[in-house]
Image (cartoon, rainbow, N blue to C red):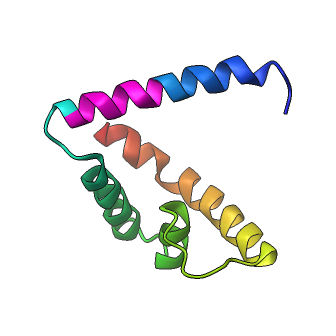
Amino acid sequence: MPKELIPELHKFYIYVDIITHQISKSGLNPKYLSKWFYNFLIYNNVTEGVADFVESIASGSVGSLLYLSKAKQSDYWYEQIVDKLNVII
């Protein structure tokens, strides 16, 4: 990993902590946000296998070929739904 990426990752983790804290403070448990996103994926025609992969719900151990396949599929589906997600957010 390039050294230049470390400060950016640190900013990201701080940002995620702040957002998670704000969501919890609002009374919305982050697990419900995760469940909502899973349903959002399914309603937008993302296959359950890819939605499970994105939400880290994969059952059992995932082989490297299957992992690469799911990673590629999740990239594809992300590009398909990101505009719909931006409209909501």
Instruction: Please tell me whether residue 50 belongs to the stretch shown in magenta.
Output: no
Residue under the point 80% across and 18% down: 4
State the residue in front, 87 or 10.
10
Instruction: Please tell me whether residue 16 belongs to the stretch shown in magenta.
Output: yes
Start-end of magenta stretch: 15-24
Residue under the point 41% across and 63% down: 41
- The picture places residue 80, in percent across and down from the top left corner, at 53, 56
Residue under the point 86% across and 27% down: 2
In the image, is residue 28 above or below residue 2?
below
Q: Is residue 39 left or right of residue 41?
A: left
Residue 38 appears in which quarter of the rendering?
A: bottom left
In the image, is residue 27 above or below residue 38?
above
Residue under the point 39% across and 48% down: 84
Q: Residue furthest bottom?
A: 60
Q: Is residue 56 left or right of residue 84?
A: right
Quadrant the N terminus occupies: top right
- The picture places residue 78, in percent across and down from the top left corner, at 55, 54
State the residue in front, 33 or 17.
17
- The picture places residue 51, in percent across and down from the top left corner, at 48, 68
Quadrant the C terminus occupies: top left
In the image, is residue 18 above or below residue 71?
above
Could you tell me what secondary structure mostly forms the magenta stretch? Answer: helix
